[in-house]
Amino acid sequence: MYNLKRRLKEGNLLVGTMISELRNPNVAYMLSQCGYDFFIIDNEHGAYSPETLSDLIAAARGAGIAPLVRIPEIRRETILKPLDSGAAGLLVPQVNTAKQAEEIIFHAKYPPAGNRGVALRRAHSLYGRVKPAEYLKQANEETFIAVQAESPTAVENLDSIAAVLGVDAIFVGPFDLSVSLGIPGEVNHPREVEAIDRVIEVCRQRGTISGIHLFDLEALKKWVQKGMRFVTYSSDVALLADAGANGIGELKKSFKK
């Protein structure tokens, strides 16, 4: 099992990244060596098959880094399959109401907290023989569920969403939020900042973790300073493309015919 929830409760900052293109399971070892605490396998915008998801999750376990999966939609299969493959938890996009949050928990948690289907000798239990009652309780306690606030409706309903038992974190999708606010891409716009500040405040009041995904390191530092503890910096695409572009740019600047 993973210890994301325990580490967050202890006040630690956990930093991850998002992958949507790289498929070699060894990426888990690379990210672990960088010092990332977790990574999110993006199956909302990415195109990972169930088999590739399972391979990435298995490698993450070996590398000592927690794998989470961003699912494409709220549905029993999209929730059940990554968890049975051993994911540490889920990131669920476009969660706008408490009812949606409750449906996620219903499929993600074993009875009595939910109605997750039980298949115990699977990747999530490392194929071992477990004591059912003890294991189900442990899995319910440790499975990490983060829901994304990406619209004015979500921000308006934050208090009721955060109140749903089993929701561990409210995670801001800043770009989608800016689009829904009518300020596409302006993630530092006062209206966007006000909405994100509300996420932090509601989470603080409810004892829920707040988080965000950003590519701008300085902007991300500011949200960490405001109290966010579960954040993702950059992505596989940006880390590869930007490092390459920056290096080539510097080399060509230094070259004189």
Image: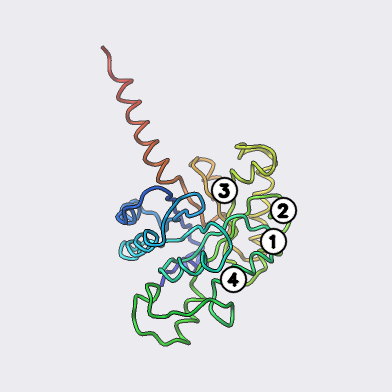
Q: Mark 1 points at which residue?
A: 97
* Residue picked out by circle 2: 153
User: Closer to the observer: label 4 or label 3?
Assistant: 4
**Disc 1 residue type (three-letter):** Thr
Checking the image for residue 105, the label placed there is 4
Between 85 and 207, the one lying in front of the other is 85
Where residue 41 appears, x then y in whole percent?
Answer: 44, 55
Distance from disc 4 to disc 3, alpha carbons, whole Å, reads 27 Å
Q: Nearer the viewer, residue 172 or 100?
A: 100
Tag 2 and tag 1, C-beta contact below 8 Å? yes
Q: Which badge, 3 or 1, is on the more N-terminal residue? A: 1
Mark 1, other Cα within 10 Å: few <14 / some 14–19 / many ≥20: some
Return the residue found at the far left: 257
Q: Distance between the residues labelled 4 and 2?
A: 20 Å
Q: Residue at x 32, y 28 (%)?
A: 248
Residue visible at 33% across and 20% down in the picture: 253
| Among the two numbered marks 2 and 3 on one chain, the one whose residue lies closer to the N terminus | 2
Q: Disc 3, disc 1: CB below 8 Å?
A: no
Q: Name the residue under label 3.
A: 223
* Labelled pair 2, 3 in contact (Cβ < 8 Å): no
Which is more N-terminal, label 1 or label 2?
1
Q: Which of marks 2 and 3 is in front?
A: 2
